[in-house]
Image (spheres, helix red, strand yellow):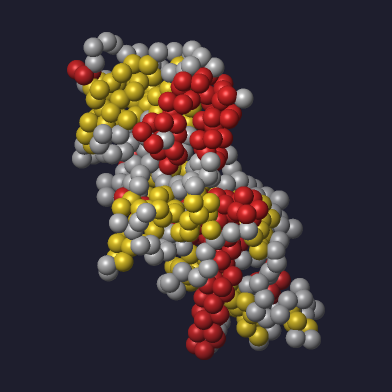
Amino acid sequence: MKKEGIELIKDGKRIDGRDFEDIRKPFRIKLGVLKNANGSAYVEWGKNKIVAGVFGPKEVLPRHLENPHKAIIKCQYSMSTFSSLEEHGRAGPNRRSIELSKVIREALENIVLLEHYPRTMIEVFITVLQAEGGTRVASFTAAVAALIDAGIPMRTIAGGIAVGKVDGQMVVDLGKEEDNYGEADVPMVFTKEGDILLLQMDGMLTKEEVEFALTKGYEKVKNVILPELRRAVEEKYAGEIVKKLEL
Amino acid sequence: MERFKLNYWKEVYDMYLPGDEVDVKTVKIDRIAVRREKGKTYATVVGVVENQSFIPLEIAYRPKVNDSIVGFVVGRKSVGYFVETGTAYTMIALARELQTELRIGDMIFAKIARIEEDGTVILSNIRKLRRGKILEIPSSKVPRVIGKEASMINLIKKKTNTVIYVGANGYVYIGSQGSVSKAIEALNMIVRRSHLSGLTDTITEFLEG
C-alpha cells in the first residue's frame, strides 16, 4: 500500500497538520434535513459529507422477508459518482457498498428495539455526497442520528471512529491519504456504554496497538462524537429560543 | 452530565436521549418510549420528563386498541375494505359493521377494535367522511393538536368553521367547508411549535388576527 514520495508524518504533525489524536474539523451533525423522510440527518466530518434518511416502520417488501417477531432493517449505503476524485464507475451498488450496507445494518440491529414493530421494515438510506476516508463510521453516526429523528426506539446511542497506524505511529480519525497509504486502519463503532457494535481491520497491528486503538476510539466516541450527536438533537428541538433565553 | 434545557410547554425541562436514565412512573403516548432493565428506567426515544411522566417528542406510530384512525379506502374484499392509514399495518373496515357501501378513495374515521395475531388491524365504529382532504402530521404531535380535553382542536374548529377529525396515526381530515387553508396553517404551526411554550396563545392570536 505504501506509496513512494508521500510523507504522512512530518515534524510530529500529520499530513493535514493535525496532531496524532485530533479529529478532523469541522465535525457537525444536523437533524431533519429531508422533508419526505420520517427522519434524516446530515453529517459533515472533515471533507466527508453524508446524508442519511430513515423511512418507516412500513410494510415489508418483498413480503417473504417479513418477520412475525420483529422488524427488519434495510440499509443502503451508496457513494455518489461525484463523491471523490477517483473513478467510481457506474452508480448503484458495488462490491464495497454492499459490504458497508451489511456491516452498518448489523451494527444498527443491535441497538434498535426491533421487537416493538413486528412485521415491518425500517429503511435506512445513506448517501455519501463527498468522501474523504472513514465514511463507514461517519455513515453509521448519520444513520443513528436519522433514527433518533424518526422516533424509532433504540436501546442506546452509538457513534463510530477510525483509529489506525501511519508511518509507525498510531493516529486517530484517519484521513484519505492516511487511509490509502497508511499501515493499518481500524474502523469501530461504540455505544455510549462502551459496547463494540462494529470492528473491522485493514492491515496489521500488534496486540498492544489494537488495545490502544480500542481505548482511544472509545474515548473519542464518548467525548467528541456522542456529545455532538446530543447537541444536534437538542438544537433541533430547543433551537434558537433557548439560546435567546440563555437557559 | 450537564443537560441542555428545553423550554417545553410552560416550564423548563431536561431533555433525554435514547439510553439516558430517567426517573418516571408513567409514559405518555406509547409505553415503549422507555424500557426497564435491572430496576432502572431508560429512555428509548428523545423526550422530556414532566411530573414523573415521560413525554416522547418523536415516536414512530404503533396501532393500539381504541385508537381513533383517519384513513382512506384503497381496496375491497368480501370481508371488508382495506384502509390506507400511512402505517406499516393493513387495516380492515369490516363490511358487516357498515350500513352503507364504501367506494375506493372514500375517507373514513374509525376506532381500532382489535389487532389480529398476524398484525392485521380490525376497525369498528366506522364513519364515512364527506368531501375534504387529509393532512399528514407526525403521530407524536397528535396529543398536542387535540390539546387538553380537546381544547386546541375545538378552538381551531370554532374559529375557522371547519370540520376536523384527528387520527392517532397522524392523518387529519379537514372538511371542505370553512376556511380550510387557515386551519391547515394552524395545524402546521402546532406541529412546528408543539414543544415550545405559549402555544395556545400563539394559535389564538393567529386565528383571530
Which one is in front, A213 or B100? B100
Toward which corner of the image does residue B66 lie, by quadrant? top left
Q: Give the residue displayed 36% in from the left and 33% down from the top.
A: B149
The quarter of the picture where residue A213 lies is bottom right
Nearer to me, A242 or A56? A242
Please identify the quadrant where the C terminus of chain B is shown: top right
In-front residue for pair B202/A134: B202
Q: In the image, is B21 to the left or to the right of B94?
A: right
Instruction: Please determine whether, in this image, residue B139 is positioned above or below residue A101.
Output: above
Residue at 42 percent across and 64 percent down: it is B20
Residue B4 is left or right of residue A81, and the answer is left
Image height check: is A10 above or below A143? below
- Vertical relation: A175 (above or below) B140: below
The reply to whether residue B67 is visible in this rendering is yes
Q: How many marks?
A: 0
Where on the picture, by quarter, is residue A168? Answer: bottom right
Q: Position of residue A106 (x, y in %)?
A: 42, 60
Residue A95: % across, % down: 54, 57
Q: Position of residue A5 (x, y in %)?
A: 80, 79
The percent coordinates of residue A97 (x first, y second) are 55, 56
Identify which residue is drawn at 70% across, 64% down: A26
Query: With A76 as the anchor, is B154 left or right in this view?
Result: left
Q: Residue at x 54, y 77 (%)?
A: A219
Q: Can residue B171 be seen by looking at this rendering?
A: no
Q: Residue furthest top?
A: B100
Side of B59 relative to A211 (left or right) = left
